[in-house]
Image: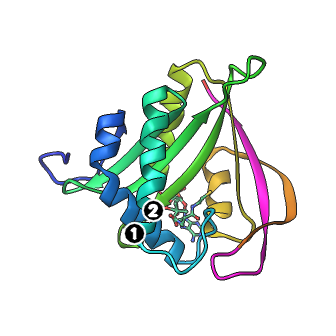
Amino acid sequence: MTAPDNKPTIRILDARQARAANADLSETLSDCINGGASLGFMLPFAASDAEGYWHEIADAVEAGGIILAVAEIEGRVVGTVQVGLASKPNQPHRGDLMKLLVHRCARGLGLSRRLMAAVEAEAAGRGRTLLVLDTATGSEAEMIYPRFGWQRVGVIPDYALWPDGGFCATTLFYKRIG
Ligand SMILES: CC(C)(COP(=O)(O)OP(=O)(O)OC[C@H]1O[C@@H](n2cnc3c(N)ncnc32)[C@H](O)[C@@H]1OP(=O)(O)O)[C@@H](O)C(=O)NCCC(=O)NCCS
């Protein structure tokens, strides 16, 4: 859905909307991985490889375990981010920020800033006061989280693999919200 002036729109999706957006979400995830982002998957990776993952996310949205936000331009999803709502009885206040993705065709437009603001507000509205995330050390994403008010905690070496192989360190961040 796009505003009349064709500006990008940000919205929180329910499960039905998440399922309807599967193809665009898959294309965005595939584009980011093929652009070199460490997102849990290895190359080669096509949009069709992501469809099952997004079905699982839609199911988690339906179960109330994930908040899913998207950015759309002219009706097409080109960006997304999630907050996983911690379910342990001793962590009712915490969420895990995951999969901040902006398709390469839509970068530099401020979409990640708007996505983060939307999902943080939604998480705060659901009673969450602390968010945590990890991101590949040395990535563009690592540089932008401090601009959004996130606190850098430290680095874990050899945490995961880059999409084309080779160990990738991860940097941990947290942010108090609400
Ligand atoms: C990281 C990413 C989400 C940024 O998306 P984006 O929509 O292009 O970012 P924005 O246009 O909202 O820019 C956000 C801020 O970061 C800054 N920024 C953007 N790219 C930057 C870069 N390469 N280096 C430094 N700062 C950068 C912008 O100037 C802006 O700052 P401001 O709002 O204070 O002016 C995008 O590059 C991406 O999807 N990367 C691949 C996936 C990934 O690694 N995700 C992280 C998973 S944890």
Element assignment for label 2: helix
Residue 81, position as x, y percentages in the image:
49, 48
Establish if 142 lies above or below 44.
Answer: above
The segment highlighted magenta reads 162-177
Q: Could you classify mark 1 by the number of other residues whose Cα lies within 10 Å: few (under 14), some (14-19), or many (20 or more)?
A: some
Disc marking residue 76:
none
Residue pictured at 76% horizontal, 81% vertical: 166
- Determine the main secondary structure of the stretch shown in magenta: strand
Judge left or right: residue 16 versus residue 139.
Answer: left
Establish if 35 lies above or below 101.
Answer: below
Establish if 94 lies above or below 164.
Answer: above
Element assignment for label 1: helix
Q: Quadrant of residue 123?
A: top right
Q: Residue furthest left?
A: 4
Residue 48, position as x, y percentages in the image:
38, 68
Residue pictured at 48% horizontal, 27% vertical: 63
- Which kind of residue does numbered mark 2 sit on? Ala
Residue with the mark numbered 2:
50
Any part of residue 58 in sight: yes
Residue 112, position as x, y percentages in the image:
47, 54
Within 8 Å: ligand 1 and the Cβ of disc 1?
no
Screen quadrant of the N terminus: top left
Judge left or right: residue 80 versus residue 6.
Answer: right
- Which kind of residue does numbered mark 1 sit on? Ala
Nearer the observer, 105 or 64: 64
Screen quadrant of the C terminus: top right
Any part of residue 10 in sight: no
Residue pictured at 60% horizontal, 63% vertical: 39
Q: Are marks 2 and 1 in contact (CB under 8 Å)?
A: yes
Residue 169, position as x, y percentages in the image:
80, 67
Residue with the mark numbered 1:
47
